[in-house]
Structure formats: C-alpha cells, structure tokens
Image (tube, rainbow, N blue to C red):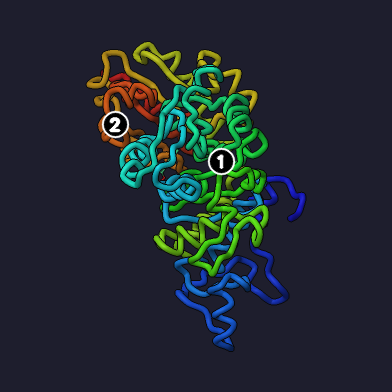
C-alpha cells in the first residue's frame, strides 16, 4: 500500500499497468479464466492459490475497483457487491447466523430498515433498532449474549443525522463486537469511519461513488482491525467444511472477514458486481474529490437559500448552524455532502406542488449524482416503513429530499425560486 493522499488514490489506486499495458484499466468482460493444468484450478477451488476462476466470485476489473475502495477507506481488503443492499445484508450475515441478534441505529436508509426488520428476520437474524441519541447506559441494555454487531450510517439517508462515532465505537469495544458503518452519503472523501472506531465500512456505490447515476453497485471494506478470536465468532475461527476445514483467521489473517464474505456469501448467492459496473464505478471514483467539493459547496448555498425563504417551513443540513448535529458534523466530516431535506409551509400537498413545478431539478428515485434531483421519501423510498419506523428514521410526511448536483448554483436556486413562487 502506498501513502498517497486520498485525491491521488481516487485517481490512481488499484490499476498498476505493467510495461505496455493499457493506461486505463480494461473491462475484463469474461465469465471465466484459462489455466494450464487441472491442479492449478483445483488449488483455486481450495483457496490454496490466489487467482480468478469464475466471475461470480472475482474478476480482474472488479478487483481493481475493490483495491481502490480499500485504499480510499484505509482498509485491508474490499468486496464489491451487486448493490448497496447486498453490501448491507452480507456485512451482517457474514458474522450472524440464525439465532443471532444485532443492533442498528434507527436513523437508517429505508431499504436497510426493511432488509433488517423483514428479510433478515426471516433468516432467523433479529435486529433491535436503537435510538442513535440514547446514552451509552441505555444502549448497553439492548445488548444480549447473542448480539454480534452494531450497524450505523455516517449521515443518515434521509434524516441527515450524523452518527455519534465515539459512543458506538465505545459500545462495540466494550462488548467485543464489530462496528459496521454505511458510509454512502459521506464517501471516504468526507469521512473515513475506520479512523473513528469502525471495523467494517459499507457503501451503496450507486450513489456518489459512481456519481453519474449509471450503475447499481455496493462495496464492503474490511478494516482488518477487529479481533475475531475473542470467542464470539466461531465461523471465523473454526474449520469451514465447505473448504476442507480451512480456518479464515488462520489462513487470511487481517482480511479474514472479507475473504469469508466472498468465498461463502458471494460464492453462494452470486450477488457480485459486474465488470462493466465496476469499470463505471471506478471511473466515477477518479473525480470523487472534485465532485464532492462542488456537491458540498452547492448544498451549503442551497440550504442557506431555503432556510431564508419565507415559504419554507424547515431545512435540515448538517452544514447549517441550526442543525442538531452541526458540531458533530464538524468533528467527523470534512464536508456535509450534497443532500439536504426540507419541508414547505402548508405540508405535503404544497411540497408536491413545488416538486411538480421544478424544471432543472428532476423527480427521480435516486440521490447523490451530478444532476440535481428531488424525491418524497414518505411516498417513495420509505413507503414500506410503518409510521413509527418513519418517525424513527426522521421522515415526516412533508419531507422533501433534495440531492444538490454540480450544476451552476445560480441556476439551481433560480429553479427552486420559481417553483416556490407557485405555492
Ligand atoms: C441507496 C442506499 C442503499 C442501498 O443501495 P442500493 O445500491 O440502492 O442497493 C444503502 N444505504 C444507503 C445510505 C443508501 O443511500
């Protein structure tokens, strides 16, 4: 690993072309790989040798993207997945089996809440959603003997709560369980959770990593900084019969978690990132720092404009002094990202009229790409949540989520100005 700064890694990490090779990483659009001997392939199957055998499990293009993500987050290894949802699921399922329990903060992306409370429950893995602002003494009470990890989100989509890293890292340390953080909205450019006590970082690469709304993808980064040998993770430390008794912590050391996720979960589900999407996500990463600076700058100006507008009831953006986590944002983030939420006076119906009147900003089920867009979570992304879950996730009926793009800020403001004039 080099000691380049993050901007340099965003551009250059991962692909290291040898003499005469393509300057840009190629798209290895191949399902399979040729070997000279049957023994060479058998060794791959037994994980005795490193190499690609089948693109359901690994692929050279995806591998480059994974290496870049590991470098950006400061982890030891990364695993790319078919979507952010897959990353969230595998990050937990990799260390929880039926009968186990885990904690997650309630201020989470709606899809994650649905996954954790419905689908993972059917797998026999139970979650307790905890109040992210509860004191440590309260949080301790939610821990059970079979609690295996804690999951949080750096900047919650769309509540815009900023995670109290110190508190949850302390709880994780106390219990001896890993702290998993969904870093989608911050990206490693604005926050590196591993530097604040997290052990595993997940992303929906669909958002700022790709950054152009071209491809769905996800990634799990293994910090390599958790002690799996504390007696609570037998799947990591006891023989895996599906690999002839291999022991992950023995054979793969610091990267045991990432390797296990790949050779069990990705092998068995096939929920791997495609080479084309890895290529596009890597291309997106090359401008991550440049885009994020502009997203942050535009979102700050937009938040200030909306907060001072007479027809706007409220605005939530951690970059505003009025935000409840403004100080916490300064502590953990080097920028507040490009997403903000607001409510129009008069409630959801008036808000919908504003959304419909927008011309430059589009109504899309997406967030975090170069084009400015809006969405109404209560009727769209968070539609599956109960009223109580909506409240816990910080979603009120009037909440409009605005993803501020990198267009000229004057044009974005003018668009909202004309739309607000219509209500
Ligand atoms: C979108 C999103 C996800 C889910 O990712 P997909 O790529 O849509 O599967 C997870 N977490 C956060 C914070 C998200 O914004």
Tell me if 133 is positioned left or right of 109 in this view.
right
Q: Tag 1, which secondary structure?
A: helix
Q: Which mark is residue 318?
A: none
Question: What residue is pinned by disc 2?
Answer: 385
Label 2 Cα neighbours within 10 Å, binned few <14 / some 14-19 / many ≥20: some
Q: Up-down: is 137 above or below 152?
A: above
Which of 266 and 47 lies nearest the eye of the viewer?
A: 47
Q: Quadrant of the N terminus?
A: bottom right
Pair 1/2: label in front: 2
| Residue 234 seen in render | yes
Q: Position of residue 47 (x, y in %)?
A: 58, 70
Please tell me whether residue 23 is drawn above or below residue 401 in the rendered image.
below
| Residue at the image point whose x is 32% and y is 18% from the top | 344
Q: Position of residue 328 (x, y in %)?
A: 59, 21
Q: Quadrant of residue 369?
A: top left
Q: Quadrant of residue 373?
A: top left
Residue at coordinates 55% horizontally, 32% vertically from top-left?
296
Q: Which mark is residue 187?
A: 1
**Residue nearer the viewer, 131 or 80:** 131
253 up-or-down from 303: above or below: below
Of residues 134 and 17, the one drawn nearer to the viewer in this rendering: 134
N-terminal label among 1 and 2: 1
State the residue lying farthest toward the top: 310
- Identify the residue at horizontal 39%, vertical 60% (top origin): 269
């Amino acid at each position: 690993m080099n000691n380049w700064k993050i901007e340099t890694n965003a551009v250059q990490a991962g692909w290291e072309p040898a003499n005469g090779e393509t300057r840009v990483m190629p798209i290895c659009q191949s399902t399979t790989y040729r070997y000279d001997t049957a023994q060479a392939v058998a060794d791959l199957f037994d994980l005795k040798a490193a190499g690609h055998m089948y693109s359901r499990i690994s692929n050279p293009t995806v591998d480059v993207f994974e290496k870049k993500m590991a470098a950006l987050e400061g982890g030891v290894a990364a695993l790319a997945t078919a979507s952010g949802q897959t990353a969230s699921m595998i990050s937990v399922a990799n260390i929880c089996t039926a009968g186990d329990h885990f904690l997650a903060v309630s201020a989470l992306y709606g899809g994650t809440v649905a996954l954790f409370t419905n689908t993972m429950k059917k797998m026999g893995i139970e979650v307790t959603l905890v109040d992210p602002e509860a004191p440590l003494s309260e949080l301790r009470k939610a821990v059970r003997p079979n609690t295996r990890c804690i999951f949080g989100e750096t900047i919650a989509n769309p509540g815009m709560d900023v995670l109290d890293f110190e508190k949850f890292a302390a709880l994780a340390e106390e219990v001896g369980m890993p702290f998993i953080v969904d870093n989608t909205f911050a990206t490693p450019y604005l926050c590196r959770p591993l530097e604040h006590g997290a052990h595993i970082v997940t992303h929906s690469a669909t958002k700022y990593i790709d950054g152009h709304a071209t491809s769905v993808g996800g990634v799990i980064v293994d910090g390599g900084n958790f002690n799996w040998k504390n007696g609570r993770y037998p799947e990591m430390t006891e023989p895996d019969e599906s690999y002839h008794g291999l022991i992950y912590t023995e054979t793969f050391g610091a990267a045991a978690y990432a390797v296990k996720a790949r050779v069990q979960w990705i092998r068995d589900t096939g929920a791997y990132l495609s080479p084309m999407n890895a290529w596009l996500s890597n291309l997106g990463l090359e401008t991550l720092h440049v885009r994020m600076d502009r997203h942050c700058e535009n979102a700050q100006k937009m938040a200030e404009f909306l907060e001072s507008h007479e027809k706007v009831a409220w605005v939530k953006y951690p970059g505003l002094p009025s935000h409840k986590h403004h100080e916490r944002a300064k502590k953990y983030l080097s920028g507040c990202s490009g997403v903000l939420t607001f409510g129009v006076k008069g409630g959801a119906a008036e808000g919908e009229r504003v959304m419909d009147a927008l011309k430059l900003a589009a109504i899309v089920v997406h967030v975090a790409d170069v084009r400015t867009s809006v969405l109404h979570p209560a009727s769209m992304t968070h539609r599956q949540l109960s009223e109580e879950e909506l409240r816990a996730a910080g979603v009120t009926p009037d909440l409009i989520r605005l993803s501020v793009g990198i267009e000229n800020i004057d044009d974005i403001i003018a668009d909202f100005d004309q739309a607000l004039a219509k209500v």
